[in-house]
Amino acid sequence: MNVQVVTDPSGRLLRLSPALPGRAHDLTAARTHRIIRICERQGIPVLADLAYQGGGPWVTTGVKRRPHHGLTPTQKTVNRALARTRAPAERGVARLKSWRIFRHARCSPNRMTSIAKAVLTLERHR
């Protein structure tokens, strides 16, 4: 399953997108649910992993290493700074993945969407 997660800077879960089949690419899923466009309209910067490269000027991602080339020290520093900034959000995602249903789900995306909404509600009251 591919569920897009939006967190605040402290890693608190704010929104989960409707589930898509697992074969959906992360950037495609974000575009399908208009997450990047909504954040842009509201002036919220998007910090994302390398799967979101090409998401537009509003999406900040790390620098990907080209085949047979290493990263420069400056690029490594940029990647580390971005990883440090994204760490709380990654902890929020890890907390979500601690729910067994997300690790072993074998149901339709529609049913998974309902489950994701329930888990989000429970997480907010934790």
Image: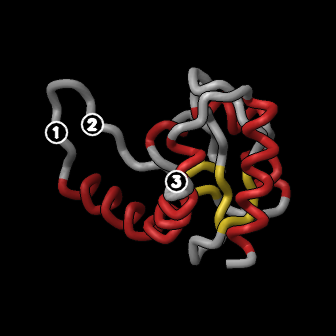
Going from N to C along the chain, the mark reached first, 1 or 3, is: 1
Three-letter amino acid code of the residue under disc 2: Arg
Q: In this view, does 5 lie to the left or right of 111?
A: left
| Residue 90 screen position, x and y as percent | 48, 61
- The residue drawn where x is 78% and y is 35% is 111
Q: Which mark is residue 97?
A: 3
Residue that mark 2 sits on: 65
Alpha-carbon distance for marks 2 and 3? 28 Å
- The residue drawn where x is 70% and y is 30% is 20
| Residue 50 screen position, x and y as percent | 44, 41
| Residue 36 screen position, x and y as percent | 72, 46
Going from N to C along the chain, the mark reached first, 2 or 3, is: 2
Three-letter amino acid code of the residue under disc 3: Lys
* 71 or 89: nearer the viewer: 89
Q: Is residue 28 left or right of residue 82?
A: right
Alpha-carbon distance for marks 2 and 1? 6 Å
* 124 or 91: nearer the viewer: 124
- The residue drawn where x is 21% and y is 44% is 71
Mark 2 touches mark 3? (CB < 8 Å): no
* 35 or 65: nearer the viewer: 35
Mark in the foreground, 2 or 3? 3
Mark 2 touches mark 1? (CB < 8 Å): yes
Indicate the quadrant containing the C terminus: top left, top right, bottom left or bottom right: bottom right
Outermost residue toward the top? 23
Report which quarter residue 32 is drawn in. top right
Indicate the quadrant containing the N terminus: top left, top right, bottom left or bottom right: top right
- The residue drawn where x is 57% and y is 45% is 102
Residue 125 versus residue 14 in the image, above or below: below
Element class at badge 1:
loop
* 48 or 117: nearer the viewer: 117
Residue that mark 1 sits on: 70
